[in-house]
Amino acid sequence: MIHDTPLIATIVAGLGLAFVFGAVAQRFKVPPLVGYLLAGVAAGPFTPGYVADQKLATELAEIGVILLMFGVGLHFSLRDLLSVRAIALPGAIVQIAVATLFGLGLAVGMGWTVGGGLVFGLALSVASTVVLLRAIQERHLMETERGRIAVGWLIVEDLAMVLALVLLPAIAPLLGGSTEQLGTDPLAAHFGLGLSGVLALTLVKVGLFVGVMLVVGRRVIPWLLHYIAHTGSRELFRLAVLAMALCVAFGAAKLFGVSLALGAFFAGMILSESPLSQRAAQETLPLRDAFAVLFFVSVGMLFDPTSIIREPWPMLATLLIIIVGKSAAAFVIVRAFGHPTATALTISASLAQIGEFSFILAELGVKLKLLPAQGLDLILGGAILSILLNPLIFAIVDRLNQRLAGREDKAAPGEPAAPAKPRSDATTLTGHTILVGYGRVGRLIGTALAQERQPFLVIEASDDLIAKLQQANIDTIAGNAAQPEVLKAANFDQAKFVIIAIPEAFEAGQVIRQARAANPQVQIIARAHRDEEVEHLIGLGADVVIMGEREIARGMIDTFTARQQQPSAPADQPVG
């Protein structure tokens, strides 16, 4: 029966194996992305056992690419890029050029064409968005100068790769490739355009698409999203965001001949200007994550693990280009711009891996008959190994930075050695209230505590909310309240109250368990949405759990009772 449902079988196998391998990777403190790639290797044709339908997996991966690029666009911040443009723009361009030259040199040495070498080098030059952002966030560096440089550098790399995805099909024939698998542009075929004509036509179509998105999409997409948001339907809002991403990407490919990836990126970038962009990102995150997982699984299916044994020296050379070559180039560039060694080391470690854009470029290179199968294996193997090694590289850099702290001023001009807020050092507050989460509920609680002049601090993980807390001069600790180092920094054992304002019962339960273990006398107040969640949190040690629906019902009953006691009040006159 399962052979009659290859689509279901592929999705089940992909997600199931990804979960198992991802959980194992997380257990060994390795990014889950490595587990997803290994899941693809296990389901691929190069390993024994079940083999998933590779054609269907590739089509599912296309959706993953669309949603990945849509997410990149949603988080694109022109303001952040402009704030560090003096270093991020030239630095990223020079680093891409150096890494591409290294890759080209290795490719030519192995007898590949120049076109294949260029694709190979470009794939090795760009770091993984997922891995870099996670590493920066774990170290609470997003609000520091080095964090902004790393993110700005990443944005420039991403934009350069988007441009490469647009131009590569047009110049593939010049580089010795073919566009047969991508199809022939009907306009180019009709008018018999040569290579220069095809390139010019590609740029014109891209320009038209960008113009339409900036003129029409900039007005229509935010307006439509606001209209749907005012309907009050969360389901419809989520559907609207996904429909916009997929329809814009598909329309860009069909009407303008632009890649699906570029269409999705622009849809996200246009939407990022809306005040609803953060909500859009949160609502679509589960589906984006699911299809991104299928994308990484499909990429893993292309990797032949025996290539590491068959070609150990090319694989080692590829890995050295990723973690030594381009990182050394980044280090030299950052130091040349006058930034301290600590910043240069952090940027170098951030870039010492490759990821999703590398896979997209590699697959396109294979379709264009530019990149040989060996190149795809080297890129996939280099990605898996570099992501595995990245936490170790960061650990080494963290230790080096600690040693350098006593010998040089780590702060560049205008950069404090450590931001005053959010803080990671232990608070001196005692008898205080610890507020976990500063969303809609947490913000109201924080305002009330401030008005009552109650000593309190906030534990928050969102970079956007941390920035707002910093502007409001509210004592803040960045991180997860269930982590031992955050518990220690918040001085849980001397706290009087812990108010858990986050809506997720699972995460709240972890915080309650840790808080109760740290201070058996502390008063813990939490929130929940269902009776089962109330019982769960009380069982873990919460003193009081407020269920929103129950409080609303009480308020409505109180209002009803007040109305009953005032029968002479006009119907349109509010009470209370």
Image: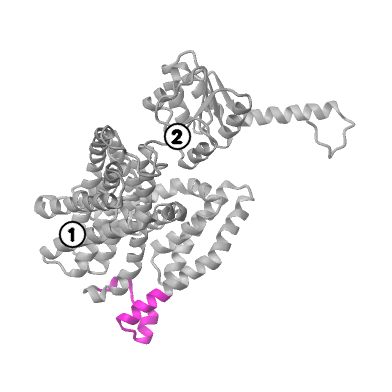
- Of residues 14 and 159, the one nearer the viewer is 159
The residue beneath circle 1 is 102
Of the image marks 2 and 1, the number of the one nearer the N terminus: 1
Amino acid found under the numbered disc labelled 2: Pro
Residue drawn at point x = 51 percent, y = 56 percent: 271
Q: Is residue 100 above or below residue 49?
A: below
Q: Which mark is residue 422?
A: 2
Residue at image location 37% in from the left, 50% down from the top: 292
Q: Cα distance, mark 2 to mark 1?
A: 40 Å
Between 333 and 36, the one lying in front of the other is: 333
Quadrant position of residue 557: top right
User: In what quadrant of the picture does the C terminus appear?
Assistant: top right
Say whether residue 389 is visible. yes
Q: Which residue is pictured at 51% across the width and 17% down the height?
A: 431
Confirm whether the magenta stretch covers residue 192. Answer: yes
Marks 2 & 1, CB-CB < 8 Å contact:
no
Q: Is residue 50 visible?
A: no
